[in-house]
Amino acid sequence: MRKNDSLGQSGLSRDDLVQNWIRRFRKADVSPQEIKVGVVASIYNSNVVEPILSEVLGCLNDLGIEREHIIVEKVPGALELPFVLQKLAEVIEPSAMIALGCVIRGETYHFELVSNGVFDGVMRVQLDSGIPIANGVLTCESIEQATDRRMSKAYECVDVVVELIVFLKKERES
């Protein structure tokens, strides 16, 4: 697999990134029309999460993944992400999933509890289901840091989806 090179900071435009992803699909003989993606987004910190969601959906559409094959569910907060990811894995059996959220450090231990719970839960769903999940949950010190990182996180999520779908196709063929 390719090394992640901070996509949002690579200097490549969204169009360049999409063209790279399309080339990777073509090279692996992956048909975007056959891909189904589940996206679960937290409503909490929506001023950060909604732009990420919008950019992810735009990129997936630009890749040729049909809108009706992109299932979006929203949850109240980051802790609910793993549960809904697990249900999507069971019900729609997507090719890949994306978890989107934003946890910002406060003055209590709550930040660590939420962050650890979300990351552990997302990983468990991924390993139990065998469905790759792009973890787009930002864990930041401030709202400013989250705002600065949101577009790169959107591109990283789409990159993970593309990379792992290509990986799984190669694995199935070997």
Image: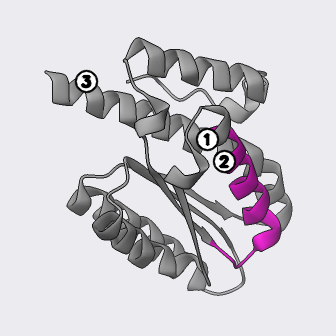
Q: Would you name the residue on which mark 3 appears?
A: 170
Q: Residue at x 56, y 24 (%)?
A: 21
Q: Residue furthest right?
A: 144
Considering the numbered disc 3 on the image, is that residue within a helix, a strand or a loop? helix
Considering the numbered disc 1 on the image, is that residue within a helix, a strand or a loop? helix
Considering the numbered disc 2 on the image, is that residue within a helix, a strand or a loop? helix
Q: Residue at x 41, y 68 (%)?
A: 85
In the image, the segment drawn in magenta is 42-60
Q: Residue 23 in the image: state x and y as whole percent.
A: 53, 15
Q: Amino acid at mark 3?
A: Lys
The image's mark for residue 56 is: 2
Q: Residue 122 in the image: state x and y as whole percent.
A: 40, 65
Q: Tell me if residue 6 comes above or below residue 106 in the rendering.
A: above
Position of the N terminus by quadrant: top left
Q: Tell me if residue 120 comes above or below residue 76 in the rendering.
A: above
Q: Earlier in the sequence, mark 3 or mark 2?
A: 2
Q: Is residue 1 visible?
A: yes
Q: Would you name the residue on which mark 1 appears?
A: 60
Q: Is residue 133 visible?
A: no
Please rate how many residues cluster around mark 2, counting C-alpha atoms within 10 Å: few if below 14, some from 14 to 19, many from 20.
many
